[in-house]
Image: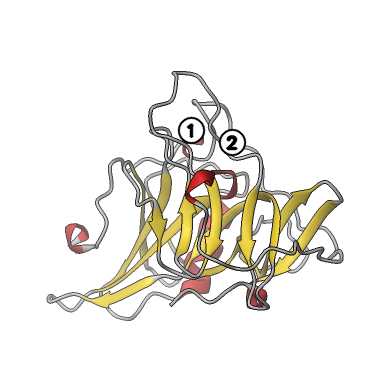
Amino acid sequence: MFLKAKHRLASFILTGSLFGCGGAPAQSVQPVPPPLEVTTSAQSAAPANQASQTESSVEPGSDTRPTSSRVALRSGEAVEGRIIGILVLAPEEKKENDGAYTLVLHFLNGRDITDIDAQGVHLRDAPDVTVGAAIAVDEKRAPDLTEVLTTWVKNAGDGHIPMELMRTPSGTLIRVGAVGKPERVFKRRIIGELSTEDNPGGQPLVDSIRLETPKGTVMVPISNLVEIP
């Protein structure tokens, strides 16, 4: 049943190395600070500059993470900074031939993202990039996205997943894994930043993304991002 999902899972155990670099412990996704004024650059929201992508032939041990990412906005402007946290892409939902419902989610580490534009979400080109994945399966009903994400956050508030299987309160099975050779461009919209269990709002997703810029941390609402067809 699980093999019918669109993406192959290279491993069914999601460890701290998934969202870290070179096996280092993952950084916690801290509660989102109060919104600050977003300062945009004068650049237009054109497709990502290929020069921003890191060549795949990198020396072992070198840090290829981008020092700055470019986030295109609906207004035609762009915000530049280092993306904080883990971003969640819109789920892929389908009903299998045997009647079961599946929902596939992908989790991207913000520090692996070089650009967000109308072409999609661009990841750096390096062999150590790993994308988190969760396949939720329910034989009776379509999995509830909020319930799936809430269960994920409850079991992994610090970014670690200590188990390969989880169940939501309603009984949906969640199989956790990682895409070992992810796409370099995900052509799916971002639905939010993964929250933490102690988030004051109590929701599993925050409807904005954070960027570190020379002027401080800025918040970019999801609704302001350029549309990804």
- Residue displayed at 87% across by 50% down: 215
Q: As shown in the figure, which amino acid type bears the numbered disc 2?
A: Ala
Badge number at residue 26 = 2
Q: Is residue 17 left or right of residue 111?
A: left
Relative vertical location of residue 114 with respect to residue 187 in this rendering, above or below: above
Whole-angstrom CA distance, mark 1 to mark 2, is: 7 Å
Of 115 and 218, the residue lying toward us = 115
| Residue 67 seen in render | yes
Q: Which residue is mark 1?
A: 17
> Decide: marks 1, 2 in contact (CB < 8 A)?
yes
Relative vertical location of residue 80 with respect to residue 188 in this rendering, above or below: above
- Residue displayed at 50% across by 26% down: 23
Q: As shown in the figure, which amino acid type bears the numbered disc 1?
A: Ser
* Image location (x, y in percent) of residue 123: 47, 49
Picture quarter with the C terminus: bottom left
Please tell me whether mark 2 sits on a helix, a strand or a loop. loop
Picture quarter with the N terminus: bottom left
- Residue displayed at 54% across by 45% down: 52
Of 27 and 109, the residue lying toward us = 109
| Residue 194 seen in render | no
Residue 222 found in image quarter = bottom right
- Residue displayed at 60% across by 68% down: 45
Badge number at residue 30 = none
Q: Residues within 10 Å of mark 1 (few under 14, many from 20)?
A: some
